[in-house]
Image: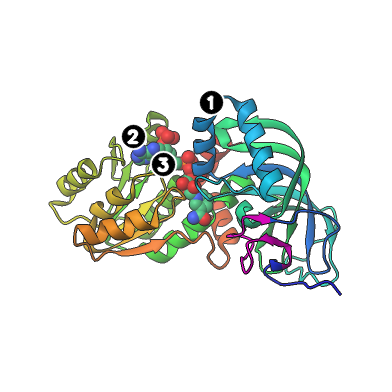
Amino acid sequence: MTHICQYGTHRVIEPANALPQNAQKIDNTLPIRSNELLVEVDTLNIDSASFTQMKEACGGDLKKVGEMICGIVAERGKQQNPVTGSGGMLLGTVKEIGPEYPNKNGFTVGDKMASLVSLSLTPLHIDEIIEIFPERDQVKIKGHAIFFPSGPVAKIPTDMDQILALAVLDVAGAPAQAYKLVKPGQTVVIIGAGGKSGSLCSVVAREILGNTGKLIAIEPGKGGQARLKELECCDHILDVDATDPLAVQRSISDLTNGEMADLVINVASVDNIEMSSIMAAKVDGTVYLFSMATSFSKAALGAEGIGSDALLIVGNGYAPNNDEISLKVIREHKKLRELFERVYC
Ligand SMILES: NC(=O)c1ccc[n+]([C@@H]2O[C@H](COP(=O)([O-])OP(=O)(O)OC[C@H]3O[C@@H](n4cnc5c(N)ncnc54)[C@H](OP(=O)(O)O)[C@@H]3O)[C@@H](O)[C@H]2O)c1
């Protein structure tokens, strides 16, 4: 009998002992094994940091971005950007359920689903790229993907458009972690607050802070600033480039009389913002690094270099019930839902 593993190691081709996420190459071929779920893929939601990097590397030429994605998937058996290491998630239709797949979602064939695990570990095969939507980092494709028992997946809710659900579920970890981290009375800084995860986190932070504390957004983009104003949840929206740590530190110091932030949430899609995040926080504050452009060595060595004892939290995209939590946020905040429907659908 073929070896099967709940973490999908049976599909790792190289190197030895790797799990699918840190594997260089995984097997994306059919048929599925007995503990797997087969999905016909409709849309890839490419991780924002990854899409930004590929777009830049291709000089903005979308045809080349499509070729790059096909090249990565053909070579690695998964959509894992070799520069950012990140993937994204997908929307699809359940096609086959292995007899030993645990099926915690109660799927039947034909159900619409979204992955809550990264494309960077999901066996994926692309037959054809149908269309690329650069404004929302999405790619419509024809192909299939395979899921293991250990990977969380979600049923697409029936009370909202599937593309809206996909946009929210893509960053489901951020609002779920924000609920755990934000406490009433705190000064909270959100870097990249005008984006998808940033606006979800901003709304959650305001909900927890209520009339207490201070919510400060760092958002240099005019579009992002306008979106945040529309949400009416931030006390301050700073037009500061987060790749400039001293400028960020000065701005937060000015607004907090030198006290700095209790909590910094970094959800910007660019690299080199580790130090802005750390220097915006109190020396014993908390910094949640959700951005996939974050470098562990830059954050850890940089914090050491300035004598910061801040708690640095790796942006784990999973939190229990993150799908339900993030969908609840969008259902309960009318302005946020309208904004998402207009911008990301
Ligand atoms: N940890 C996880 O599991 C996980 C899961 C999904 C996504 N992510 C990561 O989360 C990050 C955000 O994703 P998203 O979908 O929310 O992205 P998004 O919608 O593109 O938002 C990113 C925001 O960052 C802003 N930004 C860009 N350059 C900046 C700078 N120099 N200083 C300050 N802000 C800047 C952008 O402004 P403009 O629009 O003006 O450029 C935008 O508002 C990405 O890095 C993504 O990789 C992590």
Q: Amino acid at mark 1?
A: Gly
The residue to which callout 1 is attached is 60
Above or below, 249 against 305 in this view is: above
Label 2: element kind: loop
Q: Is residue 61 above or below residue 231?
A: above
Q: Amino acid at mark 3?
A: Val
> What is the crowding at mark 3: few (fewer than 14 residues within 10 Å), some, or many (at least 20)?
some
Give the alpha-carbon distance from disc 3 to disc 1, as whole Å: 16 Å
Q: Is residue 130 above or below residue 8?
A: above
The residue carrying mark 3 has its beta carbon less than 8 Å from ligand 1: yes
Ligand 1 rendered quadrant = top left
Q: Quadrant of residue 287?
A: bottom left
Q: Nearer the viewer, residue 178 or 23?
A: 23
| Disc 1, SS | loop
Q: Which mark is residue 270?
A: 3
Question: Cβ(mark 2) to ligand 1 < 8 Å?
Answer: yes
